[in-house]
Amino acid sequence: EAEVAQSPRYKITEKSQAVAFWCDPISGHATLYWYRQILGQGPELLVQFQDESVVDDSQLPKDRFSAERLKGVDSTLKIQPAELGDSAMYLCASSLVGGRSSGNTIYFGEGSWLTVV
Amino acid sequence: GDSVTQMEGPVTLSEEAFLTINCTYTATGYPSLFWYVQYPGEGLQLLLKATKADDKGSNKGFEATYRKETTSFHLEKGSVQVSDSAVYFCALIPGYSSASKIIFGSGTRLSIRP
């Protein structure tokens, strides 16, 4: 079964350093999402792409976070500079289509754990 | 705005017990509803879904029925196993046509004793 691939699985970085996460969605999925999950909480959307375009980044802290999906396939999420409060799991997800449609399902990757020290 | 409310955990049960995890939602129109499961250290896996009122989603012995009259989507399983220990998230995709992002509840941790 096709999966959403993410790397790295685990990352420890010092405060004020830069960190990047990579995601490869399921082949053919036009919509890609980055979520942040703080321990003990549900995931929260950071950014949503439709092909190469951002359709929702209202919750992305743009002073330090950036995301791109240049060719409409894989995506990178960057944090610079990292802060202690950024410690969380960063989840990438994809779906076949954007917009609500019957049967539209969002599939998640294994996640990237970030610890900022 | 659209939101999901789950029963707070942790929920601790003995093996073979009956499980119910309550989930209610607030949403515009007719959302699609989901249950995701997260095993320790892993990402989220889709467990089941329902896209319209009175639909029943089922998978691996788990079931949930989309109840529009009570805005609920409670998760049930007749006989739990130790391997079911995980965090369970109820979620929705809102009903308006332009919406596609998924909104999660806060999760319910389930622990099953042998």
Image (spheres, coloured by chain):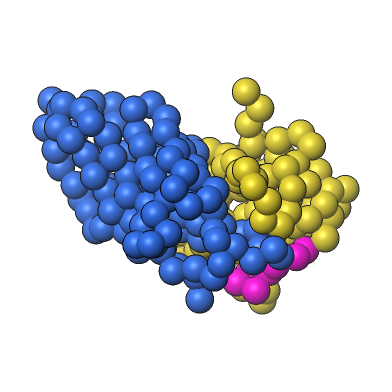
Chain in yellow in the render? A
Q: Is residue B60 above or below residue A72?
A: above
Q: Position of residue A78 (x, y in %)?
A: 68, 58
Q: Position of residue B64 (x, y in %)?
A: 37, 43
Q: Quadrant of residue B14?
A: top left
B75 relative position to A82: left or right: left
Q: Nearer the viewer, residue A37 or A11?
A: A37
From where the camera sits, is residue B107 visible? no
Q: Quadrant of residue B28?
A: bottom right
Residue at 28 percent across and 40 percent down: it is: B76
Say whether residue B2 is magenta. Answer: no
A39 relative position to B76: left or right: right
Q: Is residue A23 above or below residue A80?
A: above
Furthest toward the right, the residue is A71
Q: Quadrant of residue B106?
A: bottom left
Q: Position of residue A46 (x, y in %)?
A: 61, 63
From where the camera sits, is residue B59 visible? yes
Q: Is residue A91 above or below residue A57?
A: above
Name the quarter where the C terminus of chain A is drawn: bottom left
Total numbered circles: 0
Residue at 44 percent across and 48 percent down: it is: B54
Q: Nearer the viewer, residue A46 or B22?
A: B22
Q: Nearer the viewer, residue A78 or A33?
A: A33
Q: Position of residue B16 (x, y in %)?
A: 16, 26
Name the quarter where the N terminus of chain A is drawn: top right
Residue at 62 percent across and 55 percent down: it is: A34
Residue at 15 percent across and 42 percent down: it is: B12
Q: Nearer the viewer, residue A44 or B68?
A: B68
- Chain B appears in which tint? blue
Query: Which residue range is magenta in the image?
Result: A54-60
